Amino acid sequence: MYTLDDYHYHLPEALIAQTPATARDGSRLLHLKRNDGSVLHRQFNQIADLLHPSDVLIVNDTRVVPGRLYGRKKTGGKVELLILDYGEAEDRGQDDRTRVYRCLIKASKQSPPGTRIFFDEGLTAEVLAFSDGIYSVRFSSPAPFDDLLHRIGRMPLPPYIKRDDKGPDETDRMRYQTVYAREQGAIAAPTAGLHFTDDILACIREKGVTVTAVTLHVGYGTFVPVRVDDIREHRMHEEWFSISDATARIVNQAKAAGRRVVAVGTTSVRSLEYAARSDGRVAAGSGRCDLFIYPGYTFKIVDAMITNFHLPRSTLLMLVSAFAGRETMLEAYHTAVAEKYRFFSYGDAMLIE
């Protein structure tokens, strides 16, 4: 249960979704019941029918920043850069034309301090420092940086979604973003939320379900593999989160009344569980979440979750295994593979209750 290989499963490459479903709510939905491990095959557009009128549905309203930039060094060498801390750096009150961010840089040669990079529309950058694989980069923009970034930046799709040399396209800019995204700062989408449409959310609310949000800016750590054999030795990267007074009040009232809290995505799960107090109530506030959930963890807040299918040996697979049981979860994944569900960010969804 604590060995990395315990979370491996075979996934044919053809099942890794490269594009979203034609319609947002056109994905399939694997419905897993924890009490007996039974699996039902549904469509995501049936999700409102599967929720209870008394439920509280928690979404993550983080917004993905188009923070992948393609440029060149003075020598002409190509550079691909990814901004890692856009949301957090914004809180530090930076100038609207000069910004300093932590970044990943991909180039044929390392980029030492002093390296200058040139992008479209006159945007330039200078490497200030390098440590533990992360660069500190100062950007200088001829126009307000936010406006320029949203014109020339590309969506930071995960590495298993392949695009040509031009990178993500305009379809990705729209579809790799939830319809309720509000708070800018993520470098990856909270993908379980990609299936929701405004119409589905309206149906859910009409049924009586309360919908409220937390914010967790999905960070670089979501792509970092577990590199230890004993998963208990793994350390999670921190990610900024916020839970409002209103959301905390709604969740706490639901728990006190015995109503279900249904989390959309593992990011919502981690935010709620990180903020849980010893008395089983959620504390409002913001900070940095480094909670690693794996089998043996006792859930305090979340009663059901909607999630996508996760990579083998990933911390996210460990989280859902903690919720449903490792053997139950892996059996459900084997069923999904046999039934040719689509996997990962642009793939199909699960309801686990």
Image: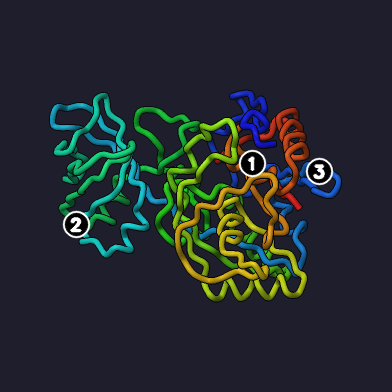
Between the C-alphas of marks 2 and 3, the distance is: 52 Å
The residue to which callout 2 is attached is: 97
The answer to whether residue 198 shows anywhere in this view is no
* Residue 59 to residue 149: above or below: below
Camera-nearest label, 1 or 2: 1
Between the C-alphas of marks 1 and 2, the distance is: 42 Å
Task: Give me the residue at 80% from left, 48% from top.
Answer: 34
* Residue 166 to residue 242: above or below: above
Check whether the beta carbons of the residues at disc 2 and disc 3 lie within 8 A of each other.
no
- For marks 2 and 3, the one nearer the N-term is 3
Task: Give me the residue at 70% from left, 36% from top.
Answer: 1
* 46 and 145: which is toward the camera: 145
Q: Position of residue 226 (x, y in %)?
A: 53, 35
Numbered disc 2: secondary structure: loop
Residue 78's image quarter?
top left
The residue to which callout 1 is attached is: 318
Task: Give me the residue at 76% from left, 32% from top.
Answer: 335
How would you rate the neighbour count of disc 2 (Cα within 10 Å): few for under 14, some for 14-19, many for 20 or more? some
Q: How many marks?
A: 3
Numbered disc 1: secondary structure: helix
**Furthest residue to the right?**
36
Residue kind at label 2, given as amino acid type:
Arg
Q: Is residue 277 left or right of residue 206?
A: left
Task: Give me the residue at 29% from left, 63% from top.
Answer: 92
Camera-nearest label, 3 or 1: 1
The residue to which callout 3 is attached is: 40
- For marks 1 and 2, the one nearer the N-term is 2
Q: Is residue 88 left or right of residue 258?
A: left
Q: Position of residue 108 (x, y in %)?
A: 26, 24
